[in-house]
Image (cartoon, rainbow, N blue to C red):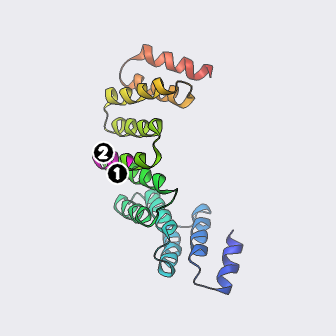
Amino acid sequence: MLLFANIALSYDDKIAEAYVIRAGYYAETGNNLNKVIEELDKAIRFNPNLWEAYHEKGKYYWWDGDLVREIENRQKAASLNHGAQLPELLTNIGESFVSAGFPEKATYYYHEAYKLEDDSVWYLFHLAYVEWNIGNYKKTLEFLEKINTIDSTSRELDRKLALVYLYAGQSGKSLKYVTKWVDR
């Protein structure tokens, strides 16, 4: 992809998407964050409405641990996108707010994404994630058990239930889900 991006830029050095591709290449090959951000900044300079550039910047700031810039860029990406990717972008913002210690903000973004997706299992998983991160295992289990009543066939759900029951001090129930998880 780097070769094609460089060829495109040799014809027109203002192709924003090519800079996003180069940033991805540099990130994957271990170049430093500054080089990645430099490429994304070029993309934004040539197309300030390219949501993908902001989305990628948010992702790289996440890797760097800069939560403020991560959230700013993820919010900007979501504000520019009105397509099928918007629920995922809103979910990413929610995850950023969980990491930053703002569970109520995270819940807001998960709810906004849910209104677009209408996937109750997905929504409940994210609400459980919020509760897990603040150490509220009882509420986490409530959400996971609601999911279990909707769809009890998920191996990943069995794993999460086993883990949360273990953290909640209910080893018997944890073992039940470990066994289900292994059997699947």
Q: Quarter holding the N terminus?
A: bottom right
Within 10 Å of the Cα at label 2, are there few (<14), some (14-19), or many (20+) other Cα atoms? many
Q: Quadrant of the C terminus?
A: top right
Task: Give the percent coordinates (x, y) of residue 48.
Answer: 46, 76
Q: Which region is colored magenta?
A: 103-110
Q: Residue at x 47, y 80 (%)?
A: 45
- x 35%, y 23%: residue: 168
Q: Which residue is identified by label 1?
A: 97
Secondary structure mainly formed by the magenta segment = helix
Q: Position of residue 65 (x, y in %)?
A: 40, 57
Q: Which mark is residue 121?
A: none
Q: Are marks 2 and 1 in contact (CB under 8 Å)?
A: yes
Q: SS at mark 1?
A: helix
Which numbered disc, 2 or 1, marks the residue that appears first in the sequence?
1
Q: Position of residue 163 (x, y in %)?
A: 45, 27
Q: Is residue 4 above or below residue 70?
A: below
Describe residue 30's horizontal placement relative to residue 8 as left or right.
Answer: left
Q: Amino acid at mark 1?
A: Phe
Three-letter amino acid code at the position of disc 2: Pro
Element at label 2: helix
- Residue assigned mark 2: 103
Residue 46 in the image, given as x and y percentages of width and height: 51, 81
